[in-house]
Amino acid sequence: MSDLTALTATQLVAGYETGAFTPLDVTHAALEQAVEAQERVNAFVRIDAESALRGAEAATERWRRGEPAGPVDGVPVTVKDILLQRGEPTLRGSWSVETEGPWDEDAPAVGRLRESGAVFLGKTTTPEFGWKGVTDSPRHGVTGNPYAPSRTAGGSSGGSAAAVAMGAGPLSLGTDGGGSVRIPASFCGIFAMKPTYGRVPIYPASAFGTLAHVGPMTRDAEDAALLMDVITGPDARDWSQLGPVTHSFRGALAAGAEGVRGLRIAYSPDFGGRVAVEPGVASAVRSAVALLEELGAHVEEADPGFEDPIEAFHTLWFSGAARVAQSFGPETRARLDPGLREVCEEGAQRSALDYLAAVDVRMALGKSMGVFLSGGEGSSKHSHSAYDLLVTPTMPITAFSAGVEVPEGSGLTRWTEWTPFSYPFNLTQQPAASVPCGVDADGLPVGVQLVGPRHADALVLAASHALYEASLAIQPPPG
């Protein structure tokens, strides 16, 4: 990476303000890294250099006049190819989507970035319709890991994670229906957050319903807070959005490393012995937890105590996949990712009663976590045993071979079986972030997950930022 592509969005904006460099300088450098990321790990569906340079020229002129369009004016960004972007095809990793438009709408978060003057570099890779926790698709191939290209970047927002890790823009928009920003963040050594459901408006609605969130994928928590300040604006097309934000997410970081002092944190290293965690992962996560304690948090090893909701998640997730493919004819189905075709067929066999039973499990899990984490911002403390945050590993493993759904030789069949720390919190709609906390013996990144009560997005960001301020989360760049 060049010096410019190693900077965070926050640092770039500071440089624009002083005139140390321009958005045009930065965009040229970011485009070079995008090409490198594409050649090295296949992070992009499309790189649009011409459009990016036009946007950078306009941003440079706005900064020259001292009239930036918004908080991220001139900052290079990428967008996962699940989200609509005006003027660009959104192919969703599938041959079932025609390239021809009209592509005349932005997704809400994309529109907010456009209004703020962000420079769009391109669309990033995704598995077909974002259905699994790794990134490969029949249409766009396999996305590798910047730290080891033969390993997976994770998914389904793997292209976005790889792009950020390799300096192809410090900001990216991903989607997360079962861990899809947190999985690749953990594998690629970046920060990502799944906000409280509805905090970032979504349009069109996901076929996976209220499991699917839009979230920031960034260099650090401060950049994520900056991005959240931009993308949480209301959008009338989303009937399930939350009310307007009344505070600045960046403002919530003002306390720095002091931001965790006095917090009650539950640390669950393996969900009560239920999850086998690789030793290198467990060690790195323990170091992060020890640092939180050193910063003044009250940490207790405590398990949230719920049973694995995997079957309920499968019912909801596979039914959503079946809905995606419901109108496909035999030829189109034959071109689907074979794994996706399997879950579509399984989902089509689930009944309405199965679906409602899964919703019952979801509601019970939501109540359980609501009581367990009722000490956070925006909720009342009705139990002295309630915690402010739950800390777990983001993933129990580090990145495995690219191009497969599950680790070879593991005996597992579906991606959900190696992501037990992520998908439960899509069921509960809680904010959850992955913070890099070191590498394993092979030099592969490890992430620690911070989960907050619903609506406590600012608290999750502040605690994550404290880890950066204390230098735990500074990740060596990929070689």
Image (cartoon, grey):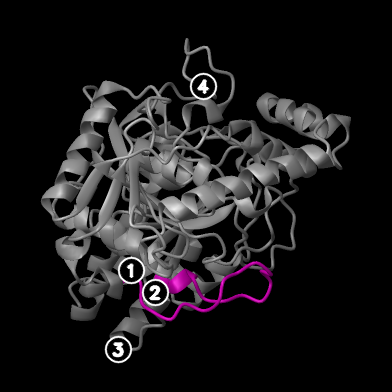
**Which of these two is toward me, 237 or 170?**
237
Observer-side mark, 1 or 3, equals 3
Is the stretch drawn in magenta largely helix, strand or loop? loop
Query: Residue 37: which disc?
Result: none
Residue 134 picture location, percent across and down: 51, 33
Whether the magenta-drawn stretch holds residue 240 is answered as: yes
Q: Which residues are magenta?
A: 229-250
Q: Is residue 210 above or below residue 259?
A: above
Observer-side mark, 4 or 3, equals 4
How packed mark 4 is, by other alpha carbons closer than 10 Å (few <14, some 14-19, many 20 or more), is many
Q: Residue at x 63, y 64 (%)?
A: 87
Disc 1 to disc 4, how far (Cα)? Answer: 41 Å
Q: Residue at x 52, y 26 (%)?
A: 417
Disc 2 to disc 1, how far (Cα)? Answer: 6 Å
Residue 200 picture location, percent across and down: 53, 65
Disc 3 to disc 2, how far (Cα)? Answer: 14 Å
Upstream in sequence: badge 4 or badge 3: 3
Q: Residue at x 69, y 46 (%)?
A: 359
- Residue beneath disc 3: 66
Upstream in sequence: badge 1 or badge 3: 1
Circles 2 and 1 in contact, beta carbons < 8 Å: yes
Disc 1 to disc 3, how far (Cα)? Answer: 16 Å
Circles 4 and 2 in contact, beta carbons < 8 Å: no
Circles 3 and 2 in contact, beta carbons < 8 Å: no
Which amino acid type is shown beneath numbered disc 3? Gly
